[in-house]
Image: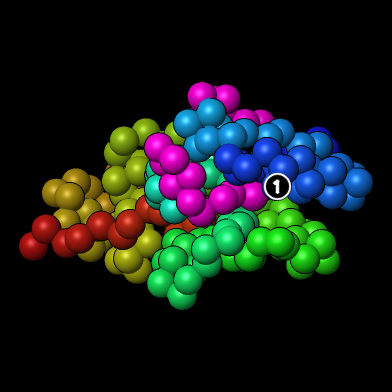
């Protein structure tokens, strides 16, 4: 397991220095940035971590960076820090997924607890991403025809109903259905439904 890295983004050097010292003392790696642009230029980050983000910064604000990062697959949990915290900003940041919104000067225990919550959230998200990637690889085993028939099977339709819907023989449906179950290593339709739900596979819509 890689050591978590805490990314501190604040245009006030004294704040960054104080937070960095606190975070390192707690046993985490730290990277500091004086602007949102600097962080984005840093590039893709690997391993577990979270962001401690100032709200008001020149060029790009904290909430603007949050919005930009939310569109990426590997966005990290964010803890907002502000000396200018107000209710609308806080509500909007939390609504968009921020872990916490703390005011400066930040309380040591509050910050460390927010970091622990952030890393826990990041760990769960990473596990979900790994599972989803594994599911995508599973579904790649299927031919286009098998995938199509699978989307009808998870609606609860019988083989003869699927055959009629696709204008193919019932025996063809049966063969493809068996291959789907074999390739996905499952034995029941209930398992197939759960697998498709996790993988984001939608049931077919009747053509008739």
The residue at the far left in this view is 208
Q: Which residue is found at the position 8% from the left and 62% from the top?
A: 208
Instruction: State left or right for residue 45 relative to residue 141.
Output: right
Is 191 a magenta residue? no
Report crowding for label 1: few under 14, some 14 to 19, many 20 or more residues within 10 A (C-alpha): some
| Residue 190 shown left or right of residue 22 in the figure | left
In the image, residue 125 lies at what x, y percent?
A: 61, 52
Decide: is 181 above or below 114.
above
Asked if residue 44 lies in the magenta stretch, the reply is yes
Could you say where residue 127 lies in the image, as x and y percent from the top left?
66, 49
Q: Is residue 68 left or right of residue 25?
A: left
Q: How is the image coloured?
A: rainbow
Q: Quadrant of residue 58?
A: top left
Question: At 35% across and 43% down in the image, what residue appears?
Answer: 147
Quadrant position of the N terminus in the picture:
top right
Q: Residue at x 35, y 68 (%)?
A: 156
Image point (58%, 40%), residue name:
11
Q: Quadrant of residue 202?
A: bottom left
Pick the residue in front: 167 or 113: 113
Q: Quadrant of residue 175?
A: top left
Up the image or down, 82 lies above or below 148; here it is below
Along the line of sight, the residue nearer the viewer: 174 or 116: 116
Q: Position of residue 22 (x, y in %)?
A: 84, 49
Across and down, in percent, residue 87 comes to 46, 75
**Which range of residues does the magenta coloring cover?**
40-61
The residue singled out by tag 1 in the image is: 15
Residue at the farthest bottom position? 87
SS at circle 1: helix
Does residue 20 appear anywhere in the picture?
yes
In this rendering, would 108 be left or right of 123? Answer: right
Instruction: Count how many numbered circles sit on residues in the image.
Output: 1
Say whether residue 137 is visible. no
């Amino acid at each position: 397991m890689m050591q978590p890295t805490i990314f501190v983004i604040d245009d006030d050097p004294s704040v960054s220095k104080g937070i960095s010292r606190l975070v390192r003392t707690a046993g985490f790696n730290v990277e500091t940035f004086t602007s949102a642009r600097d962080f984005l230029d840093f590039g893709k980050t690997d391993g577990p971590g979270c962001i401690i983000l100032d709200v008001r910064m020149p060029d790009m604000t904290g909430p603007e960076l949050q919005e930009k990062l939310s569109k990426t697959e590997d966005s990290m949990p964010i803890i907002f820090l502000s000396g200018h915290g107000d209710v609308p900003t806080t509500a909007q940041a939390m609504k968009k997924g921020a872990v916490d919104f703390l005011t400066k000067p930040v309380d040591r225990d509050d910050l460390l607890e927010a970091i622990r919550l952030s890393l826990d959230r990041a760990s769960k998200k990473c596990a979900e991403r790994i599972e989803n990637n594994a599911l995508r690889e599973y579904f790649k085993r299927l031919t286009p025809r098998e995938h199509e028939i699978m989307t009808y099977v998870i609606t609860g339709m019988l083989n003869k109903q699927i055959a009629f819907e696709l204008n193919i023989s019932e025996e063809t449906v049966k063969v493809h259905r068996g291959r789907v179950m074999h390739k996905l290593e499952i034995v029941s339709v209930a398992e197939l439904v759960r697998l498709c739900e996790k993988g984001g596979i939608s049931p077919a819509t009747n053509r008739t």
